[in-house]
Image: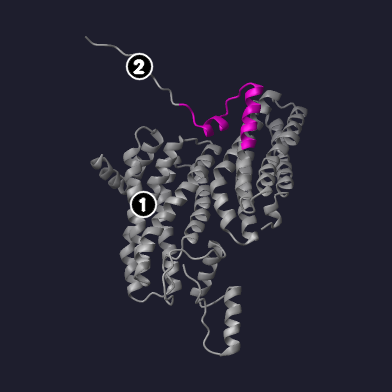
Amino acid sequence: MEQSFPTMISVPRPSLGARLTSPETHGAAQELARLAVGLGLAALYGLALGARSGGMSLVQHALAASAGLAAVAVLGIPALFVLLALVNAPVSPGAMLSAGARSLASAGFVLAGLAPSAALLAVTIESSDAAAFVTRAGLTLAGGIGLFQLASSVRAMLHDLTPEARLKCNALLFCFSLFAIMLAARVWYSLPILKGAA
Amino acid sequence: MNSQVLSVFDELLRSPRAIAERSRAGGDLRPLFVASLLALVLGAGVFGATLATSRGGLQLLYSGVKLPLSMVATMLLVVPAFHAIAAGLGRPLSFSGMVGLTLAAAGRGALVLVALSPLTWLCFDRGLTYHPGVLLAVACYGLAGVAALDLVLKGVGFDARGFAIVSLFAGVLFVTGGQTAWMLRPFLGRPSAPSVPFFRHRESSFWDAVQQSSLSSFGVYQLSKAAADGEAAVRARAPGPRLENADESR
């Protein structure tokens, strides 16, 4: 007699990277969780850099690495929403939160991915200039990917606009990008490793 | 399993696209992991030992062990970065798929190194000197890297975004791999050294070394501060011929 067993159909769960960078929008709580995960992942990069000096430097670097992204989230994204609303762009607070969370989570995820390499380089490179250069390269790469994600998400919301309105929004987005770069750089330059700490 | 592993060896060379698709699709990647790791260890081991023929002796064994070690360590360090960069640029793959793709690429690169080993050995045998030898090794790594990145490119997609992902990953790989290998040097061994160390003490960085070797191969020598101090002391006692870069080893 044949015995039948219940079959288990396993649906492959998307990877952490896919979930963090997914363009799907969720509720505010989930988006904030996505943002928090991104900031937490960015701290891993800071920890890797802090391994160069050890001790309190681990905490300082972890906080500063996350703070650069947090500053853009707190000071930059709301300002971008207000400016886009002023030119009647079809953006909602929820969609902006989702776009911001996605971009900062992407940046944090890239920083976390770079953390093992950064730890090796920070610990083994003797020259403080070379260590600072490698640190800047990692932050630039992650920040660039985050900004790319944000610009892609916002531009996807502007499909139905007239060419003139879209031009205004793109100009605003460009100005915001410059502001975000300067803001993140301002915060990240508090990293001791960028100040030439051995 | 054995026949599967052998067929993967063949595919690594002939059908990088099939390997890339298998990595992307997921499923049972064990034969791919095993074959790629074998190719990596054997290929890098053979090339490492070939580099050491300029020094001979115990260096052959050390380099044959250390080069595969440095490549495996580099893979472990860069796979998370590759996974994150691909996801950040909108091409998320499963982590196991990424590991498979990266390992397969490294295995393919190592097989290219095996193919370049006879030529490298011949160059050293015909009297290639130390600094041009270092540059020849760098050129071989470059060729192997191109073959490896070709497979990676097929895995992430042959378009502008795929190129961006692979270029950024190549940057991370270059810096991390260079520094890992630098930590595990010497691979060629200093010809004048009386003994062969397994590791050298920590000094400067990979990038400084590439710069110095490039200059030295054109006859422009820069001495490290310690060496310069030592040489100044020797000169003060007994002037004689300069021992340029005599203390360095790659």
- Left or right of A191? Residue B168 is left
Residue at 61% over, 50% down: A51
Check the image and report above or below for B8 versus A74.
below
Q: CA distance from mark 1 to mark 2?
A: 39 Å
Chain letter, disc 2 residue? A
Highlighted range, magenta: A13-40
The residue nearer to you, when weighing A96 against A189, is A189
Q: Which residue is painted at 50% across and 43% down in the image?
A: B82
Task: Point out residue A85 in the picture as x, y percentages from the top left corner.
Answer: 75, 27
Q: Badge 2: how crowded within 10 Å, few (<14), some, or many (20+)?
A: few
Magenta: main secondary structure equals helix
x and y percentages locating residue B198 in the rendered image: 43, 64
Q: Amino acid at mark 2?
A: Thr
Instruction: Kindly indicate whether the residues beneath marks 1 and 2 are on one polypeptide chain.
Output: no
Q: Name the residue furthest front.
A: A55
- Circle 1 SS class: helix
- Could you say which quadrant of the image residue B8 lies in? top left
Q: Coloured how?
A: one colour
Q: Give the farthest residue toward the left.
A: A1
Please give the chain letter of the residue carrying mark 1.
B
Q: Is residue A92 visible?
A: no
Q: Position of residue A126 (x, y in %)?
A: 60, 61
Q: Quadrant of residue B197?
A: bottom left
Residue identifier under label 1:
B40
Dot 2 falls on a residue whose secondary structure is loop
Residue A7 is tagged as: 2
Disc 1 marks a residue whose amino acid type is: Leu
Q: Is residue A139 above or below residue A5?
A: below
Rendered location of residue A134, percent (x, y): 60, 54
Quick check: A25 above or below B94? above
**Magenta stretch: includes residue B56:** no
